[in-house]
Amino acid sequence: MDNPVDNSQTKRTALRISVVIPVLNEEKSIATTLAALAPLKPHELIIVDGESSDRTVEICNRVGVTVLSSPRGRGQQMNHGARQTTGDVLLFLHADTRLPSSAFDDILHALREPQCVGGRFDVKLDGAHWMLGVIGTMINLRSRLSRVATGDQAIFVRREIFGKLGGFPNIPLMEDVAFSQALKRRGRIACLRSRVLTSARRWEKEGIWGTIFKMWMLKSLFLAGISPGRLKRYYGDTR
């Protein structure tokens, strides 16, 4: 009798997944993220550095991944990385976010539906404070209802759709929200229930309630038409 067909392997080889990670001074997080990603064996893994001044690039080079340089700006960095890829699916991963072991199979299962143009994962924040679980649940619910994702939810998209959209907008903040809004107009968005684990460092450093208020205000002002350049002054970088 012939050996049975390995359906999971067939699914994995049907579409090639390229992973792009924008980084800026992520020496505390990037090694853990890369270690979690390695068993998934992406078709390509491209790190795009935005002029880090710490050991981020050294750590990436040590494990043998491709590192590109780009002007600082998450949207610019992700677009630059995407242009170097050859995969059928692009997955944009934050440097402090870890994928679940089922990530690629979950993506490929969702994309078996032709109308599905891309999607995102549910998110879990990695801190110990009880409110972080509530925040993660609210983020997931909001995203499921609106079909709009933030970058820490590991946005993925079919390559041809990404090209048609012109990539991420070159704005200093909310490039993920703007891209998601454009993406959902192209077709169905997969809101995967498998969860990525992302750092709660902003919430822990800046305070739970203060961060909730700030993020809510920034998104509301962005949707009201306030320029991302003005909003960026109040966002701040947390490393």
Image (cartoon, helix red, strand yellow):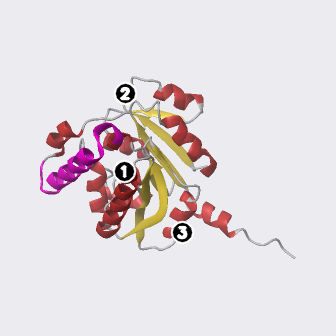
**Dividing the picture into quarters, in which one does residue 136 lie?**
bottom left
Left or right? Give the position of 14 relative to 224.
right
Q: Is 225 one of the magenta-colored residues?
A: yes
Question: Is tag 3's residue or tag 2's residue first in the polypeptide sequence?
Answer: 2
Residue at the (40%, 30%) spot, across then down? 25
The amino acid at mark 1 is Gly
Check disc 2 and report the residue beneath it.
51
Given residues 203 and 122, the one toward you in this image is 203
Residue 90, horizontal then vertical, whole percent: 46, 54
**Disc 3: CA contacts within 10 A as few (<14), some (14-19) or many (>=20):** some
State whether residue 4 is above or below residue 36: below
Picture quarter with the C terminus: top left
Give the foreground label among 1 and 2. 1
Dots 1 and 3: beta carbons under 8 Å?
Answer: no
Mark 1 or mark 3: name the one nearer the start of the chain: 3
The tag earlier along the polypeptide, 1 or 2, is 2
Residue lying at 39% horizontally and 52% vertically, measured from the top left: 130
Whether residue 121 is situated above or below residue 174 in the rendered picture: below
Provide the residue designation for mark 1: 151
Residue that carries the numbered disc 3 in the rendered image = 109
Kindly tell me whether residue 185 is visible in this rendering.
no
Residue type at tag 3: His
**Of helix, strand and loop, which one carries label 2?**
loop
Magenta residue span: 204-226
Residue at the right extreme, as displayed: 1
Crowd tier of the residue under label 1, counting other residues whose Cα lies within 10 Å: few below 14, some 14–19, many 20 or above: some
